[in-house]
Amino acid sequence: MKRLAPIVAALVLSACASPFAQIDRGMSREAVFAQIGQPTRVVPLPGGAQRLQYSRQPAGQYAWMVDLDATGRVAGVRQVLNELDFSRIVPGVWTRADVEREFGPPARIDGVSRWNGPLMTYRWRDRQGADMFYWVYLDPQGVVRRAHPGMEFRDRFFDFWS
């Protein structure tokens, strides 16, 4: 339990430091813009609702979704680049549009020699603070066929030799 205390404290402090911690339910769209600026994207949701996407991709590891109800008031705020949210992706059912609606734009879209379709890469940080990738493999029609996490070894080699 003592080993968890510093981790919990760091998470609480980082949440408080985030400008998204200041966004409250019921806040107007205009107040959100005044507080944290223009979103990366605005995505329409059913019933006239909207999602304001604030993505830190390609270099960052976080993406916040600010959901507005049909009246333009905040219904919820959450950071979505995490293991629990990624686990909602359903291969064979989700499409590229579903992935981008839920997670925002990816850090990269690549092609790889052993896959016939685009590969979307999201950068994120796991609960232990490790730098991670989350790969979403799409078929040529834009349907998710597989998705999984992997380690990002950013600058580890160069840190070792410096």
Image (spheres, grey):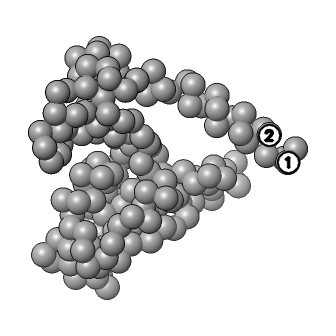
- Foreground residue among 145 and 93: 93
Q: Which residue is painted at 57% across and 25% down in the image?
A: 16
Image spot of residue 38 (x, y percent)? 24, 25
Numbered circle sitting on residue 147: none
In the displayed image of the protein, which residue is found farthest to the bottom? 114
Label 2 CA crowd tier, 10 Å (few <14, some 14–19, many 20+): few
Q: How many marks?
A: 2
- Res 146 → quadrant: bottom left
Q: Which residue is painted at 45% across and 21% down in the image?
A: 22
- Foreground residue among 28 and 160: 28
Indicate the secondary structure of the residue bearing disc 2. Answer: helix
Question: 7 left or right of 62?
Answer: right
Three-letter amino acid code of the residue under disc 2 = Ala
Q: Is residue 111 visible?
A: no
Q: Which residue is painted at 43% across and 28% down in the image?
A: 20
- Res 116 → quadrant: bottom left
Q: Is residue 69 visible?
A: yes
Question: 48 left or right of 108?
Answer: left
Q: Which residue is painted at 57% across and 54% down in the image?
A: 126
Numbered circle sitting on residue 5: 2
Q: Which residue is mark 1?
A: 1
Indicate the secondary structure of the residue bearing disc 1. Answer: loop
Image spot of residue 95 (x, y percent)? 21, 67
Say above or below: 141 vs 122: below
Q: CA separation, marks 2 and 1?
A: 7 Å
Say above or below: 99 vs 81: below
Three-letter amino acid code of the residue under disc 1 = Met
Image spot of residue 42 (x, y percent)? 18, 37
Q: Are marks 2 and 1 in contact (CB under 8 Å)?
A: yes
- Res 37 → quadrant: top left
Question: 9 left or right of 143?
Answer: right
